[in-house]
Amino acid sequence: MTELRNVEADLYRFRARVLVAGAIILLAFALLAARLVYLQVVRHDDLNAQAESNRTAVVPIVPNRGLILDRNGIVLATNYSAYTLEITPSRVEDLEATIEALGRLVEIHPRDKRRFKKLREESRNFESLPIRTRLTDEEVARFAAQRFRFPGVDIKARLFRSYPNGELASHVVGYIGRINKTEKERIEETDEDGNYRGTDYIGKLGVEQSFETQLHGNTGVEQVETSAGGRAIRKLASSPATPGDTVMLSIDIKLQKLVEDLFGERRGALVALDPNTGEVLAFVSKPTFDPNLFVDGIDGESWQALNESIDKPLLNRALRGTYPPGSTYKPFMALAALESGKRQPGSITNDTGSWMFGGHQFRSHGAGLGPVDMHQSIVKSSNVYYYSLANDLGVDAMHDFMKPLGFGQITGIDINGEVRGVLPSQEWKRKTYKRADQQKWYPGETISLGIGQGYNAFTMLQLAQATATLANNGIRRKPQLVIATQNPMSRAIEPIAPEPAQNLGYKPENVAVIRKALVGVTQEGTSARVFAGAAYLSGGKTGTAQAVGVGQKDKYDARKLEEHQRDHALYMAFAPAENPKIALAVVVENAGFGAAHAAPIARRVFDYMLLGQYPSEVDMVAVQKGLAGAPIGKPRQAADMPGLTAGVNGMAPQTGASAAASAAKAAAIAEALSKLTPAVPPLDAYPD
């Protein structure tokens, strides 16, 4: 029997299915419409920006770093463009194999590999890092032909910082290096991160660091259209970068070179100031270093050699080295005595060769100098006079007088890193030491302060500022290294005005007494031999400061001490005496007598500044070896000397046919030096 279908039921089910399907389709279309409205209306601006971002890229334009010039326009820091071979580690499968393969195309030294490893540790994996810098055109061509073999490796044109004079004035100029994590965080905190987009380097030391804002410039931007693969197609818009300002220093780089040459291989520092303006004419720290080593990132081996050297070439001795001032402190002690009324110019102290206090013998010059007044105490450098004076003044009175002169204070010079040093007082000792017995000030500790020993420890910058203040009749000026900036676009020069001078209020007659005595030092005293025949009058004071203590019953003998334990040689001076244009302080570490090693450098500086004279070749070497008093041989004219690219001591490099002449000249210099005797006074005369 055949079963009949229920047509009505089938139609009902069919209609129900159609309705459900239609509802689903309508719902789907409704969802699509809602999504379309959401994307086209609600998120229109956001998605349009994303699409534009995918189509375009904003590339930072790194500004050219500003130049650094000396006071005469000589370039101390500049830039040049060169090609670099760079690797993006995240895009390279086998980094070591890639570097080895690259080494067969272009020369890659072990130093380059060490630097690349260090940069990789400090950087993000997707950053492009240089494996070789300063590629030649031939090396660029060789790599370009094999470019397809090295994904993730590119050649880029970059600007490099260059210090054309190498080690000369490196502590003043400073250097740049790659931005580290701490510096990056500091940039972000100061909202400067936008201006440092694309910038890999920042000033690390000296003027490069202190004037980073002026030297860096303003970063520009360039908007380019890119393909789906990220390749630039065309430039859409751009805002050019603004180069950094040119920074002009007060330094006379030729004078700086002369002083550095005069030091030779010895350690020490010299600061020369214009007492009328505070401008720094020379700022020497020896030994120096080559700032070019740091531009690409210094390798570990070079860093270790600099950092672990016993001579500490990275230490800015003029800014951060502290030394007992020795007898260069005595003129300021004498001025304190006059201003406080503790002594009169004619007051007599009998120098018997030693001074007793509390059962302790403080030694002076052999059998003594006999009766000395204030003038003679400075000219002959009497220790007994100042032992007695220190006892009468007391430590706190000395502190209060010396503080306004800048001793043990931050001078405020316009580069970073200055140290305060130590100007002792009872309060200083209480704050410095922890134990109660150490915090107590003992009267015997005051005595040695009078001759610039004891706890006294000052920088050559502080001693030079105090000397300049004395030369300027008690008017103190803040030391200034940067005197102007220049806008690279308008070429307009913006002078940096010095801060207002401070008059310390000394009585003119008291200052005159001290200045007259300092002139006497150069005419009849401890530096008379050095300034014999000078065409000008100058004032100065020699000093010899202990690097290590000597027992009360022992006698100082440099021959029995290691070189780094011998006394420091110091000299402070100004010239010309009647109207000073330059004041300076110099220390030669572990050299011995100030008259033999420090004063001769000052004499050559004054001859250069006041007479335009440059030492003879024999004289230059004699000063380096501590064999010179007054200048030896016929001085050369500074204006006739070769430029800064010349050889050592201002002599042009000798090559080829001139080698024999160079050897003959060296032999003649050696013969002339062999006839000299060290410029050291007798041991029973003036020890400083």
Image: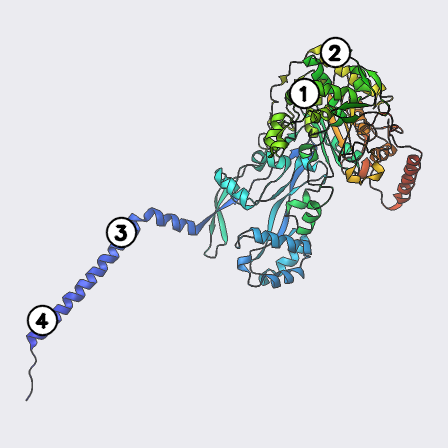
The label nearer to you, 3 versus 2, is: 2
Q: Which residue occupies 80% across, 41% down?
A: 562
Q: Which residue occupies 63% across, 38% down?
A: 205
Query: Which label is found at residue 37?
Result: 3
660 over 337 or under it: above or below: below
Mark 1 residue element: loop
Q: Which residue, given by chain and number where applicable, does mark 2 sit on?
A: 344
Q: Amino acid at mark 3?
A: Val
Q: Is residue 317 left or right of residue 33?
A: right
Q: Which residue, given by chain and number where applicable, does mark 1 sit on?
A: 394
Mark 3 or 2, nearer chain start:
3
Mark 4 or 2, nearer chain start:
4
Q: CA distance from mark 3 to mark 1?
A: 89 Å
Q: CA distance from mark 4 to mark 1?
A: 120 Å
Quadrant showing the N terminus:
bottom left
Q: Which residue, given by chain and number where applicable, does mark 4 sit on?
A: 12
**Residue 5 found in image quarter:** bottom left
Q: Are marks 4 and 3 in contact (CB under 8 Å)?
A: no
Residue sticking out furthest to the front: 359
What x and y, as percent, mark residue 24? 20, 63
